[in-house]
Image (cartoon, rainbow, N blue to C red):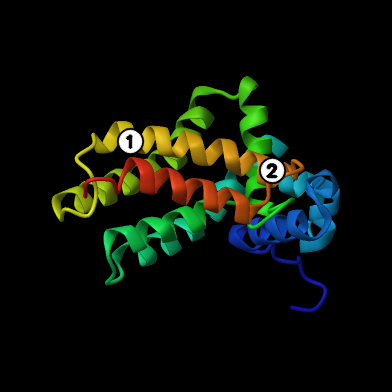
Amino acid sequence: MAGGRRQAPPREDVLAAAMEMIADRGLEKLTMAALGREVGMSSGHLLYYFGSKDELLLRTLEWSEGRLGAERGRLLTRPATARERLDAYVDLYVPDGHGDPHWTLWLEVWNRSKKADDDARDRQAAIEGAWHRDLVALLAEGISRGEFRRVDPDRFAARLRALLDGFSIHVAIGLRGTDRAQVLAHVHEFLADSLLADA
């Protein structure tokens, strides 16, 4: 209706806009005021919806993880060997490069979690738990098919994800001498040595 109240955009549109701003301009440019201008809302209206910038960032991360989770599900259920699907999991996990928006956001949310409440910490743990459970299931399948060595899937998944996290942080922050191609080569070598030997 002309001259009527402008309706707020759906929450998902706000989260998508936040992610796009991080990708295009960097996290430091993502303020409530700037995001409000992007989506046609006041910063006060955004605070009403999200309560704080910390909550906005966590919700944006959860939204982004939901999209990654759907992609991970497609990759892990496609008809392929366990090793091929493990390579796809690793490829999806490792950042695209310096300033990868998802990893930039992930690092910021975890950095802010020092002051987070129990609910926020539980939600962050749920994000990590989804990646872990999928990896454990894939490893168990590969072991049962004889593609992988007989390792403890849960322990191996914890160690592999710690390795991936460490390397991924290096890629995301642009640490010299650690690019995506080098990281993938290191991880594939580690998997060949520790998981495929004697298979």
* Distance from the alpha carbon under mark 2 to that under mark 1: 43 Å
181 or 109: which is nearer to us? 181
Residue picked out by circle 1: 156
Residue visible at 67% across and 29% down in the picture: 112
Residue visible at 33% across and 49% down in the picture: 134
Q: Residues within 10 Å of mark 2 (few under 14, many from 20)?
A: few
Is residue 106 visible in the rendered image? The answer is yes
Q: Amino acid at mark 2?
A: Tyr
Residue picked out by circle 2: 48
Q: Earlier in the sequence, mark 2 or mark 1?
A: 2
Up-down relation of residue 58 to residue 92 (above or below)? above
The image quarter containing residue 89 is bottom left
- The answer to whether residue 163 is left or right of residue 147 is right
- The answer to whether residue 43 is left or right of residue 151 is right
Q: Amino acid at mark 1?
A: Phe
- The answer to whether residue 149 is left or right of residue 25 is left
